[in-house]
Amino acid sequence: VGKRADGVGRAVIALKKDGRSLAGVTIRIRKNGQTVAHDITDKTGVVAFRLLYGKYEVLVLREENNIDVFEFSFVPELQGRELELELP
């Protein structure tokens, strides 16, 4: 009981623009072209997902036609640590 699944962790993303946190922004996590998770950043610009370790795309949907895409590899060292994404 309480055993963590192998290869699963908590990915934490902190979204910023010009050094300031961005709240209320939709984030989608995509793997092999499929959306596997989505959520909205909280008031501190942070969102967290339970993911298997591997390669993903992070889609930041600022507006309907304004989407930023980042690639990242979720590895055990990132477990529970904030991955900071600075928007252009």
Image (cartoon, rainbow, N blue to C red):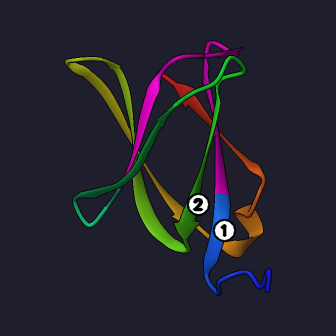
Q: Indicate yes or no whether the magenta region holds residue 24.
A: yes
From the viewer's side, name the closer residue of 10 and 73: 10
**For the N terminus, which image quadrant?**
bottom right
Q: Which mark is residue 85?
A: none
Residue at 59% over, 16% down:
23
Specify whether 17 is left or right of 34: right
Residue assigned mark 2: 50
Q: Amino acid at mark 2?
A: Arg
Q: What percent of the width, then of the height, locates residue 85?
A: 59, 35
Tag 2–tag 1 contact (CB < 8 Å): yes
From the viewer's side, name the closer residue of 6 and 17: 6
Residue at 65% over, 87% down:
6
Residue assigned mark 1: 9
Residue at 63% over, 55% down:
11
Specify whether 30 is left or right of 17: left
* Cα gap from disc 2 to disc 1, whole angstroms: 6 Å
Range of residues picked out in magenta: 11-29
Residue at 66% over, 68% down:
9
Q: What percent of the width, then of the height, locates residue 78?
A: 72, 62
Q: Indicate yes or no whether the magenta region holds residue 34.
A: no
- State the predominant SS element of the stretch in magenta: strand
Specify whether 85 is left or right of 26: right
Q: What percent of the width, then of the height, locates residue 77?
A: 76, 69
Disc 2: CA contacts within 10 A as few (<14), some (14-19) or many (>=20): few
Q: Amino acid at mark 1?
A: Gly
Q: What percent of the width, then of the height, locates residue 40?
A: 50, 29
